[in-house]
Structures are given as C-alpha cells and as structure tokens.
Amino acid sequence: MLNGQVATKQEVEVIIHDTQVLSKNFQCWSFSFVRRAGNNVAHVLEGKSLSGSGYSLWTEFPSLWLLGSLSRRDGSPD
C-alpha cells in the first residue's frame, strides 16, 4: 500500500468499509480506477494536508499550488 508494501485482505476490507460508510454522507458520488501515473493529484493533496500548512478552501477554481498537477493530462507534476 505505502512505499511498495502489499496490503493484507483485512487492511483492504477496512478501507472498503470506511469508504462505504463515508460515501453515505454524499448525495452523489462515483468511484473509478486511476492508474498510478494519473494519481499524482491525490498525492499532492495528501502532501498538502500532512504538511500542516493551514486551512485551504476553494469553491470554483482549484488553488494555485494544485494547478500544475491538474493541468497535465496524466496528473504528473510539471
């Protein structure tokens, strides 16, 4: 799961359960598979949240620090 580690069946079941529980809080949602190369936006968001750099909110347009990853078709950084 992290850094090349393989997840156990129990770990995957916990993630699926948590996802099912959290998805009940939304009126509309969808899940899809994203290849690792296109998953950079998720990593950028995770890094920002773990950095403790404060509160960030956008309603229509993403923050400037995220635009580089979003502008690439495959989601990789500039």
Image (cartoon, rainbow, N blue to C red):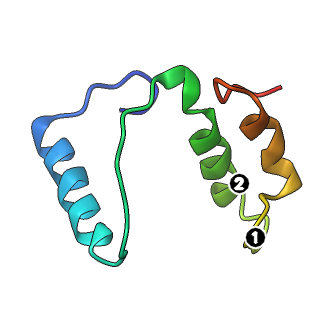
Mark 2 or 1, closer to the camera: 1
Horizontal side of 62 relative to 73 (left or right) equals: right
Eyeballing the image, is 31 above or below 76? below
Image location of residue 71, percent across then percent down: 78, 35
Find residue 20 and name its label: none
Quadrant including the C terminus: top right
Q: Residue at x 18, y 59 (%)?
A: 17
Eyeballing the image, is 46 above or below 35? below
* Amino acid type assigned to the residue bearing label 1 in the image: Trp
Q: Residue 40 occupies which quadrant of the picture? A: top right
Distance (Cα) linking label 2 and label 1: 14 Å
- Density class for disc 2 (Cα within 10 Å; few <14, some 14-19, many ≥20) is some
Image location of residue 28, percent across then percent down: 37, 68
Residue identified by numbered label 1: 58
Quadrant including the N terminus: top left
Horizontal side of 17 relative to 33 (left or right) equals: left
Q: Residue at x 22, y 63 (%)?
A: 20
Q: Residue at x 60, y 50 (%)?
A: 46
Q: Residue 58 occupies which quadrant of the picture? A: bottom right
- Density class for disc 1 (Cα within 10 Å; few <14, some 14-19, many ≥20) is few
* Front-most of residues 11 and 59: 59
* Front-most of residues 34 and 13: 34
Eyeballing the image, is 72 above or below 70? above
Residue identified by numbered label 2: 48
Horizontal side of 5 relative to 54 (left or right) equals: left
